[in-house]
Image: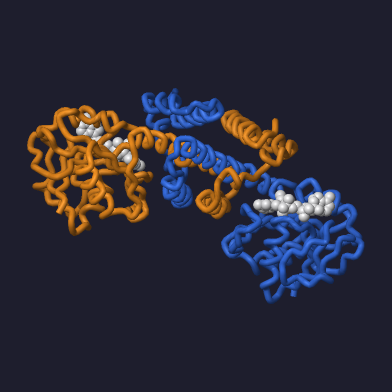
Chain colours: A orange, B blue
Amino acid sequence: MIRVVILGAGNVAKHLYSAFFHQKHIEIIQCYNRKNLQLHPDQKKETIIKDIRLLKDADIYVLAVSDDAIEKVSSIFPFKNKLVVHTSGSSPMGIINNKNKKGVFYPLQTFSKDKIVNFTTIPICIEAENQIDLEILRKLASSLSNKVYTISSEQRSILHVSAVFVNNFTNYLFSIGSDICNEHRVPFEILHPLIQETAQKAIKMDPSNAQTGPAIRKDVNTIERHLEILTNTTQQNIYTTLTKAIQSKYGKEL
Amino acid sequence: MIRVVILGAGNVAKHLYSAFFHQKHIEIIQCYNRKNLQLHPDQKKETIIKDIRLLKDADIYVLAVSDDAIEKVSSIFPFKNKLVVHTSGSSPMGIINNKNKKGVFYPLQTFSKDKIVNFTTIPICIEAENQIDLEILRKLASSLSNKVYTISSEQRSILHVSAVFVNNFTNYLFSIGSDICNEHRVPFEILHPLIQETAQKAIKMDPSNAQTGPAIRKDVNTIERHLEILTNTTQQNIYTTLTKAIQSKYGKEL
Ligand SMILES: NC(=O)c1ccc[n+]([C@@H]2O[C@H](COP(=O)([O-])OP(=O)(O)OC[C@H]3O[C@@H](n4cnc5c(N)ncnc54)[C@H](OP(=O)(O)O)[C@@H]3O)[C@@H](O)[C@H]2O)c1
Ligand SMILES: NC(=O)c1ccc[n+]([C@@H]2O[C@H](COP(=O)([O-])OP(=O)(O)OC[C@H]3O[C@@H](n4cnc5c(N)ncnc54)[C@H](OP(=O)(O)O)[C@@H]3O)[C@@H](O)[C@H]2O)c1
């Protein structure tokens, strides 16, 4: 049995609670958050605390708090020498206060409030200061997911930058597509299968080999026509920046 | 029975051949291409022609040739008053030569040479000059797909610009993520589930409401750290451009 305490009551804390809750070999001892919030409808009230000094003994303390709160919350921690892990992709392990044993338990996925998550296929990136702690984290992670990776803080920062490109920026491009369609009263749903296939392709083949479109074809007429259709200067700017980047990657000039 | 002729032997021509080939109520009369290429291993040699003057009578002629060849190939067409359609997202219907009846049969998907395509869920955008031709196109399209849309040339050009954002540019962002990972020897496959979820989310909810990440959070520290990790100026430029755009969309300044 791995005894876990969850700190924080945001997206990640809630999804981890639900995932741990169903595991036979994991016991959620306590949850701490400043507002005394329940993380799950089935959670017993007495396991929720808002005074961190009331924390009980456990095997792992999971700091699922905002990136900029990790340092502070770990510093007011009432124990020494416990395994304290954060769940952040962008913060180094070393940000956790020195009085405890540090670790990272980073589920590499984008969590939303209302969307149920299947943890089985979510990569979990773990890191610890020593082999014993790493094994505990591996056990905890493997109980949720088939994809557990031991990743250093430096590698994790690389994954995090890449994730900004493939998730945050990509979503923003989807929102531009949606804005353009809405503005002209064309149903955006017509593009849904294309969005799905674009992602599928990037998984099945190297995205560098999947590049298509007017930029790589050097189809100047289409590019000009597109820039005329776009009246929004931000959209035009992004179109031009990405078109130039694609052309320079594939050895062609705009 | 709808009697079809396919012109061209590229990606779209081949995928359409395979899709039509299996339909009971569609007969592929002939295929024209300059190189006498076979579109399908089961295709009979005598149905392939490279001299356009040998074209036979049919109900629909599908011009699945490069955008900049549509006008030319339709002009050397040996018939008058036949229904001639192109398959392009970016070309107006009017580009087809006046001597024939014009139409569009645009399958809105990204086709690769080797990937088998399930047409059932691919949106097909049709357009014609009159109701009778539109009905023939609808019949042809409905035999392949459950998603048939009557779309004007203007609307189609809107879809095409949007498709560049959600497909071409998105794929390019995936390739940047892949490049960053490869450069630092981090397996890109760790990001595959995130890519899949990003696409799923854009389909299930309005992408404008799904935006997350350091840009929208105005997380200046993370943004600065990311720009330091990126040593490639193109990547830095794209990171900054998209971060600024997200912040200005959501009312925050970099
Ligand atoms: N969201 C994702 O998709 C995702 C994915 C992977 C990893 N992560 C990482 O997981 C961690 C949590 O992210 P999240 O999305 O769950 O964030 P979130 O939904 O914004 O929740 C943040 C939580 O941290 C708490 N908190 C903030 N400052 C605090 C403080 N000084 N003391 C105590 N609690 C404090 C908040 O409590 P209050 O309500 O009291 O402020 C809230 O419960 C972050 O490190 C994030 O980078 C997020
Ligand atoms: N690929 C996609 O994902 C996709 C999706 C939807 C719509 N479309 C549209 O479908 C059409 C065909 O695209 P594709 O991807 O199939 O292109 P492709 O693979 O590049 O094939 C183009 C075909 O056009 C022929 N062609 C070019 N110039 C010609 C000419 N002057 N005379 C006769 N044949 C000529 C080529 O023959 P040669 O080999 O002899 O040059 C080739 O068979 C385009 O309008 C495109 O916009 C493409």
Residue B248: percent from left, percent from top: 48, 28
Is the residue A222 above or below the residue B95 in the image? above
In the image, what residue occupies the spot 35% across and 51% down? A147
Quarter occupied by residue A152: top left
Residue A153: percent from left, percent from top: 33, 34
Q: In the displayed structure, does residue A23 sit left or right of residue A181?
A: left
Quarter occupied by residue A130: top left
Quarter occupied by residue A12: top left
In the image, what residue occupies the spot 48% across and 51% down? B203
Q: In the displayed structure, does residue B19 sit left or right of residue B95?
A: left
Is the residue A48 above or below the residue A42 in the image? above
Residue B154: percent from left, percent from top: 69, 46
Report the front residue among B62 and A144: A144
Would you say residue A254 is visible in this rendering?
no
In the image, what residue occupies the spot 70% across and 41% down? A217
Residue B55: percent from left, percent from top: 88, 65
Q: In the displayed structure, does residue A93 sit left or right of residue B107?
A: left
Image quadrant containing the N terminus of chain B = bottom right
